[in-house]
Image: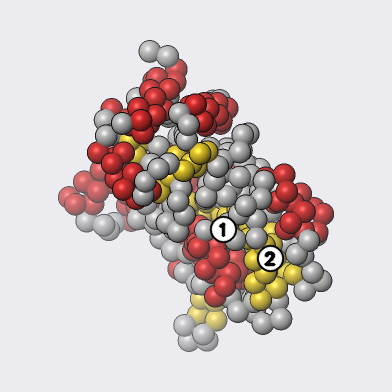
């Protein structure tokens, strides 16, 4: 068995399906499933209680914080634990205190998980039309919409619709405007260095293959962010009589709550012993997927040398096509409001998954 075949064998779902949907939810490894089951079994027998159980959960939180920080290329002290990218965006936007008079620049290709919290902030939102642009035109289009009132750039690292790589770091450097990066389609899919961002989010259930409702937020200067969505794990101390509280130091002040002990165990397992070369492997397979779809005569909208999402048009209704592909053992995503199907290619996939997709589309 080759090294990549051995890595692929971690995921039971790949025995039955060509799983190509990590942009929504990544496949669960046997180790992750076992870790979740072990904690659930212990809690069923002993109850979700006891000092040892609670202490183990707290210790695992800090272990997971460190593992997620490694995925972002940052210090664990700058990472807050959340349950999603959407929650992380809410924390960042609320902490900045955006409101009337402030301006946020974003694009028409963002996921609602970013656009929703930004729109709800009360700030003026300038939406840059980039959906039909090539990747090399993104910088100029976005930069041209920045004004002296712009207080934040809210951008994806990788566009969820077609895998375009957004030059957020270059925009941050050239405009000198703080940037909030939606990393839902980047972290775990491509190599990430979040240090140039002011905020960078991740959804751990996607490309990191963790349990549902797990995620994180990187904050470059967490001490400057006022916690407005308070949670018990983010508070160092409080006085109920005086009505005062003190946040924890670092990004822990922005933690949004206690993740279930089982979910933490599953995420720890998912982030442990990840194979070297996984990003290069995913990039190679994504390029091959794009090539095969083009050879099949399909209308591929994803440009070459982007990220690990490959989107295309095919004759017929995208929802019906997605359901038909599932019946043939191929799991992809249709994108509501568009005429696109989206393929998510990870390091756990191989040529057989791609060939299965092509054969199912031809049938």
Identity of the residue furthest to the top in this view = 1
Residue drawn at (47%, 35%) of the image: 298
* Location of mark 2 (residue): 105
Left or right position of 9 against 165: left
In the picture, the quarter occupied by the N terminus is: top left
Spot occupied by residue 31 in the image (x, y as percentages of width and height): 33, 34
Left or right position of 111 against 75: left
Residue drawn at (45%, 28%) of the image: 296
Which disc is residue 110 wearing?
A: 1
Which one is in front, 97 or 357? 357
> SS for tag 2?
strand
| Residue 248 visible | no
Identity of the residue furthest to the left in this view = 45
In the picture, the quarter occupied by the C terminus is: top left
Which one is in front, 213 or 55? 213
Above or below, comparing residue 324 to residue 153 in the picture: above
Residue drawn at (60%, 65%) of the image: 92
Spot occupied by residue 85 in the image (x, y as percentages of width and height): 50, 57
Local crowd at mark 1 within 10 Å, few (<14), some, or many (≥20)?
Answer: many
Which one is in front, 321 or 350? 321
């Amino acid at each position: 068995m080759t090294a990549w075949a051995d890595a692929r064998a971690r995921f039971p779902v790949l025995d039955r399906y060509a799983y190509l949907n990590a942009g929504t939810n990544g496949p669960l490894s046997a180790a992750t499933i076992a870790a979740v089951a072990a904690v659930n079994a212990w809690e069923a027998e002993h109850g979700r209680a006891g000092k040892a159980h609670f202490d183990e959960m707290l210790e695992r939180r800090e272990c997971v914080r460190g593992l997620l920080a490694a995925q972002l290329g940052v210090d664990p002290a700058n990472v807050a634990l959340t349950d999603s990218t959407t929650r992380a965006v809410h924390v960042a936007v609320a902490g900045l205190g955006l409101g009337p008079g402030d301006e946020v620049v974003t694009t028409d290709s963002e996921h609602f998980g970013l656009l929703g919290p930004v729109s709800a902030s009360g700030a003026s939102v300038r939406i840059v039309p980039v959906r039909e642009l090539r990747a090399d035109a993104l910088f100029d289009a976005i930069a041209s919409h920045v004004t002296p009132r712009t207080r934040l750039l809210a951008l994806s690292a990788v566009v969820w619709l077609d895998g375009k790589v957004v030059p957020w770091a270059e925009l941050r450097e050239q405009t000198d405007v703080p940037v909030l990066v939606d990393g839902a389609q980047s972290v775990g899919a491509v190599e990430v260095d979040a240090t140039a961002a002011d905020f960078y989010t991740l959804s751990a259930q996607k490309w990191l293959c963790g349990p549902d409702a797990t995620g994180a937020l990187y904050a470059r200067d967490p001490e400057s962010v006022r916690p407005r969505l308070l949670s018990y794990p983010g508070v160092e101390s409080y006085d109920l009589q005086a009505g005062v509280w003190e946040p924890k130091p670092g990004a822990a002040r922005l933690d949004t709550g206690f993740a279930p002990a089982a979910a933490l165990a599953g995420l720890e397992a998912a982030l442990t012993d990840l194979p070297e070369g996984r990003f290069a492997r995913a990039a190679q397979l994504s390029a091959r997927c794009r090539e095969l779809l083009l050879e099949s005569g399909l209308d591929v909208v994803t440009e070459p040398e982007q990220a690990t999402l490959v989107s295309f048009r095919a004759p017929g209704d995208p929802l019906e096509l997605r359901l038909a592909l599932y019946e043939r053992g191929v799991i992809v995503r249709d994108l509501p409001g568009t005429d696109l199907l989206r393929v998510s290619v990870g390091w756990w996939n191989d040529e057989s998954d791609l060939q299965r997709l092509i054969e199912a589309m031809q049938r």
